[in-house]
Amino acid sequence: MATTEVERRRGQLAALSIAVVVIVVGVPLWWKTTETYRAWLPVSQINELSNLQLQLSADVEVVFARGTVTPEQQKKVPLTRTQDEEHSVDEDTALRYRYETRYRTATIMEEDALDQPTAAEADLSLHTLSECPCGSLVVYVIPESSSLLPQDVDVYIGQRRTALLRIGGQIRVGKTLDLLLAHLEPRIKQVLQVMSFSHTDITAALSDRVRLSPGNKESIADSMRTFKSSPGYEITFSLLNPDPKSHRLHWDIEGAVQTYIQPLLTKLASVANFSIDSQTLYYAMLGVNPRFDSSLGAYTLSPDSLAHMINPVEARLGSNAASSNPVLNFLLYVPDAQHSPLHIHDSKKQEVPTNAFHSPRWGGIMVYNVDGFYGPEAVFPVDLNINMAKVMGVFLAQLRLLLGVQSPNAPSGFLVAPCSRTGLADWELDRLMWSRSVENVATATTTITSLAQLLDQIGNIVINDNIAEQVSSAVTSLQLAVAELEAGNLRFALQYSKEAILASERAFFDPSLLHLLYFPDDQKFAIYIPLFLPMCVPILLSLLKIVSDARQKRREKQAKKD
């Protein structure tokens, strides 16, 4: 009897020991070794970014030339005025524009520059005196009697960040300075809308974050045409020769790119990186059958058929598989002898002057007719040299549109200087940089907040230290970009916004974040139950037996006392 009691006691102690080891050591060890590693993320800062409050600051300097202010008015300058505008885009996004305007009189050297015979020469002379910082403007107020501007022009906008503003005849020299500034303020604001950011452009740049108003059709069309902001772009020029037996084409694409395209891309180096390649495709057809118009004696392409030209050609263009950058395609199509000449018609059935069209976020196609370069007695194949100046003029205009360099609609009385050799004015670059900075900030905030919500909802996703580092880097860059926009430092704001979007996309598309790599809870139970159930059942039964024996002894003791 004593031996049986000892054995039972030993079995109970063994069961308790095993249970204690399993509970105290085994369960924590299993929990620790199988838990999902999740590095720390700046969730509070990400939540702050979800409520985006952007402030854009522009510095404007208004310079009064001789004859625009009286000696009494000159005593009150220089002076500075600040104007704020607030716009609520939606419940989570608000915009604030701050214009800091400084007024002063022109220096002697500036007066000499304003004495040039033409406005273009004056603009160049003023630029050589001092270079205006990126994102800021200088408006020179000239007297009504100045011969720099034609009679019907009040404002001249040149290639740099300067504008010439003729003072109106309504304000006489004897008026007070406050009345003079009140008269100039609406015109200066119009200059800002043209040369700097406008609310329409900034709202369109927020298309990834907010819905555009259906009534603003122009900004919606522009945002759909323009390529999305990217760290780099691939530009491909393709020559399509459908009939090599008739035409032997020669094009100096390398020289044309260096002459017409490279100056623009050099100026856009701060916005994105560009790579250029070219190719010649033989026996490449457009995929549509042009219709012959007997009244014109030529083949025509209607607007409805243009959309069907891209897919058949795109299959032969190829792409750079090693790059994830967007590709801008520019195609030069030379019709075969049987379908020449070939003209593109618009919706009004009128010939398009450039004989070209562009497809939003894809590229452009130009039809180049060569039937006029040889007669009916020509011996085929005919050697033909393509006029690259004519071709590149069209492709350069299409490239500007696709990259978001859009010439704004200038108000009446404005004269905007034509594009220079670089194909891009300094103030046009600033407009693009404002839009790209805001677009990058909006895209990066959307990406980071979406990633934070995803990681919060799915607890099985592993958050590596590398992902946490990328997220922290993106948040820091976003904060710096917002701060630089508020300070008016456009170049730094664009740089930080590019870093933010790169870091956010690297974190969002990291392969380790794939949820399918980790087991859901139901699959975990299916795996662990066959392992732990055979071990846990004897332990649980032993514990239940020990509890039952303890209760039985307690009852026996209670019965003896009674």
Image (cartoon, helix red, strand yellow):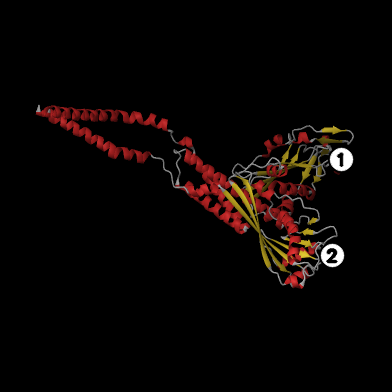
User: Which numbered circle lies on residue 378?
Assistant: 1
Question: Outermost residue, right direction?
Answer: 295
Q: Looking at the image, tell me whether mark 2 or mark 1 is earlier in sequence order.
A: 2
Toward which corner of the image does residue 381 lie, by quadrant? top right
Asked whether 534 or 385 is in front, the reply is 534
- Residue at left 79%, top 46%? 386
Tally of numbered discs = 2
Residue drawn at (73%, 38%), measured in percent from left and top? 282
Where residue 485 is drawn, which disc sits there?
none
Q: Amino acid at mark 2?
A: Ser
Q: Name the side, left or right, on which 285 lies relative to 452.
A: right
**The C terminus sits in image quarter:** top left
Residue 4 position in % (x across, y down)? 12, 27
Disc 2 versus disc 1: nearer the observer: 2
Q: Position of residue 81 (x, y in %)?
A: 67, 63
Q: CA distance from mark 2 to mark 1?
A: 56 Å
Q: From the image, which quarter does the N terminus lie in?
A: top left
Label 2 residue SS:
loop
- Pick whichever, 560 or 492, lies toward us: 560
Residue to which mark 2 is pinned: 147
Circles 2 and 1 in contact, beta carbons < 8 Å: no
The answer to whether one can see residue 352 in this image is yes
Report whether residue 509 is seen: no
- Crowd around label 2: few <14 · some 14–19 · many ≥20 (10 Å): some
Give left or right: position of 20 versus 388: left
